[in-house]
Amino acid sequence: MRSVQRQAVRAYATLCVERERIETKMAAGETINADIYGQLCDRMDRQSRRMGPPKAPERKSLRDHLASGSARP
C-alpha cells in the first residue's frame, strides 16, 4: 500500500472514531451538535470517495498456485 493510501485510510479511521464518540453520546441521551455531526458524516463520505473502491486481492489460478510450490502436500 502506498503512503498516500495509508494516510487516506488513517484519516478515514480517525473520522470513524470521532463519529462513534458522538453516536455513543447520542445513545446515552446526551445532546450533541447536529451541525458538527452532519459535517463529520459529510467529510467521511468525501474521504471514502477519495480512497476509491476497495480492491480485491489478486487471486492466483490453481495452476499458478501449484506451479509456485506453495501448495502443501
Image: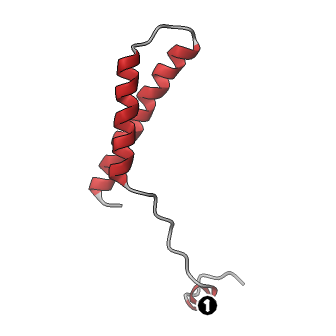
The residue positioned 53% from the left and 19% from the top of the image is 24
Please, is residue 44 above or below residue 32 in the view?
Answer: below
Q: Amino acid at mark 1?
A: Arg
Residue 47: percent from left, percent from top = 34, 44
The residue positioned 41% from the left and 39% from the top of the image is 13
The residue positioned 28% from the left and 55% from the top of the image is 3
* Quadrant location of the C terminus in the rendered image: bottom right
Residue sitting farthest toward the right = 73
Please, is residue 32 above or below residue 3 in the view?
Answer: above
Q: Is residue 27 left or right of residue 54?
A: right
Q: Which residue position is annotated with label 1?
A: 63
Residue sitting farthest toward the top = 30
**SS at mark 1?**
helix
Residue 26: percent from left, percent from top = 53, 15
Please, is residue 50 above or below residue 26 in the view?
Answer: below
Residue 20: percent from left, percent from top = 49, 27
Q: Nearer the viewer, residue 60 or 28?
A: 28
Residue 9: percent from left, percent from top = 37, 47
Q: Is residue 5 left or right of residue 66?
A: left
> Splitting the image into 4 quarters, where does residue 42 fall?
top left
